[in-house]
Amino acid sequence: MLRLGFIGLGTMGGRIARNLTRAGYPLTVFDADEAKRETFPNADPVESPAEVAANSDIVFLSLPDTPEVLDVAIAKDGIIAGAHPGLVVVDHSTVAPMTPQRLTKELKPLGVEWLDAPVSGGPAGAQAATLTIMVGGSEEAFERCRPVFRATATNVHYMGASGSGATTKIVNQLAVGIETMAMFEAFTLGVAAGISGQRLLEVLRTSSSGCWAMEKLVPAVLLSNRAREEPAAWFALRLQHKDMRLAVETASAFRVPLAMGALSQQLYAIAEGQGWGNRDQVSAVDLYADYVGIEQW
């Protein structure tokens, strides 16, 4: 059986890693937080990413941003120090496309394949093993990992060369970010005009404005008044802001105008500047709600 490694046991990574152990795979784990790795069930905790790489055929990453991915990959005690021919690294993090493209070039001479494989589905999807995975990189390496993906996801898509998975995830996050901002404005207007938020949801979710943000975030976070919780009830605002920034930067590189995306990114930036970064992304609604005096939804 393939030996697996997992680096990053946070909200998403911890759930994904548990599904791998439930599927019976031997798992070596590392997290910068010693408590997370020492208490992780049915796995072998180690002291560095290098040890994870040395003990694994496939290493999975789930990290917050590009600096953490680069540190885990090529720092002194990173994956590069434990690299061996045939190793495949599957990065579930959301990063700019240039990150996997760079790491593919740096690790290829060592016989290591790097797959950018960001996920969508949130903590609920990670818990239920119903994630969507979008993969870029070597198709041969992808096929080698495909059976393992079945333990964590119901939708797995090979998107093409290195960076293609990362690009697809950025496009997804761009759409969700804009969609969510639209929901903020719509529900603020409705509630400010005296209509119950719950009644609005009942009508709008079956109307032409129905969408993922309305179906998932509005009932679970907005109307349950969980937007201000820390840690985030669903997805941290600082991470959504990061993803929107990546989308704007990617669009600039391809000379694609991004009017609504750029505005949404700036609104998330303002919300994070208010100190709401560890709250749910839905807490950005307070930019509107505070202005019109809505305290409870």
Image (cartoon, rainbow, N blue to C red):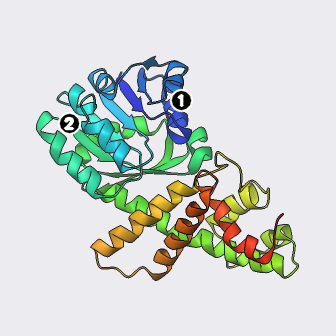
Tell me which amino acid carries mark 1: Arg
Residue assigned mark 1 = 18
- Taking the image as shown, residue 23 lies to the left or right of residue 252, namely right
Q: Nearer the viewer, residue 54 or 24?
A: 54
Tell me which amino acid carries mark 2: Val
Rendered view: 141 above or below 65: above
Q: Nearer the viewer, residue 68 or 117?
A: 68
Task: Find residue 185 and report its horizontal and vertical position in percent.
Answer: 68, 77
Rendered view: 8 above or below 168: above
**At 27% across and 28% down in the image, what residue appears?**
77
How crowded is the residue under tag 1: few (<14 C-alpha within 10 Å), some, or many (20+)?
many
- State which quadrant residue 204 falls in: bottom right
N-term mark: 1 or 2: 1
Task: Find residue 143 and report its horizontal and vertical position in percent.
Answer: 30, 42
Measure the alpha-carbon separation of dots 1 and 2: 25 Å
**At 61% across and 62% down in the image, what residue appears?**
274
- Taking the image as shown, residue 117 lies to the left or right of residue 239, namely left
Under tag 2, what secondary structure? loop
**At 82% across and 75% down in the image, what residue appears?**
191
Under tag 1, what secondary structure? helix
Residue 49 seen from this side: yes
**Total number of numbered labels?**
2
Rendered view: 89 above or below 289: above
Task: Find residue 10 and report its horizontal and vertical position in percent.
Answer: 52, 37
- Taking the image as shown, residue 227 lies to the left or right of residue 43, namely right
* Image quadrant in which the C terminus is located: bottom right
Residue assigned mark 2 = 112
